[in-house]
Image (cartoon, rainbow, N blue to C red):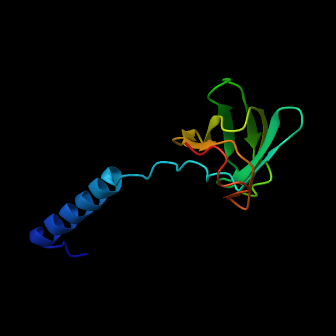
Amino acid sequence: MARLPQWLRFGMGAALFALAAASCLSPTLPLPPPEEPSSMTAGADGTWEVRGTCLEGAQVVVVNERTGRGGVYLDRESLGRWVVKIDGNACDVVEATQSLANEESGAVRFVLRETVDGLPVDPAACAP
């Protein structure tokens, strides 16, 4: 079997090195936060049912910043949807994060107010 010319061996080696270096150095995108809730409903007992979308199979953590209390939802069926019941008052600020495969997202912050399909029932509620 004939040997490859030296210039061809060098060129192939350099190309393989560049490919390996690029694959190791290519940035990975961070895990996005869950979407803002599509539905928030106030209960008579001071609890809120908050619903939204997430990555399939993600764990979503929702925390009321005023009370420090919240809830966790694990999307076991990989449907890409979450629902959490939390204590709170209208206009409390809440944050949600999601995690998947040992990666955690940044937070999305929102205000507790009645919403349907992502739109406020009363747009003037919680206005500054």
Relative to residue 23, is residue 6 depicted above or below?
Answer: below
User: Of all residues shown, which one is farthest toward the bottom?
Assistant: 2
Relative to residue 113, is residue 87 depicted above or below?
Answer: above
Image quadrant where one finds the C terminus: top right
User: Of all residues shown, which one is farthest toward the left?
Assistant: 7
Residue 45, position in %: x, y?
88, 32
Question: Residue at the spot x=18%, y=62% of the render?
Answer: 14
Residue 96, position in %: x, y?
62, 40
Relative to residue 29, is residue 103 depicted above or below?
Answer: above
Residue 113, position in %: x, y?
71, 45
Question: Residue at the spot x=68%, y=23% of the render?
Answer: 67
Question: Residue at the spot x=22%, y=65% of the render?
Answer: 15
Res 85 quadrant in image:
top right
Image quadrant where one finds the N terminus: bottom left
Residues 125 and 45: in front is: 125
> Does the rendering let one see residue 92?
yes
User: Of all residues shown, which one is farthest toward the right?
Assistant: 44
Residues 31 and 69: in front is: 69
Position of 53 with respect to 85 (left or right) is: left
Residue 49, position in %: x, y?
80, 43
> Does the rendering let one see residue 100?
no
Number of labelled discs? 0
Relative to residue 64, is residue 79 depicted above or below?
Answer: below
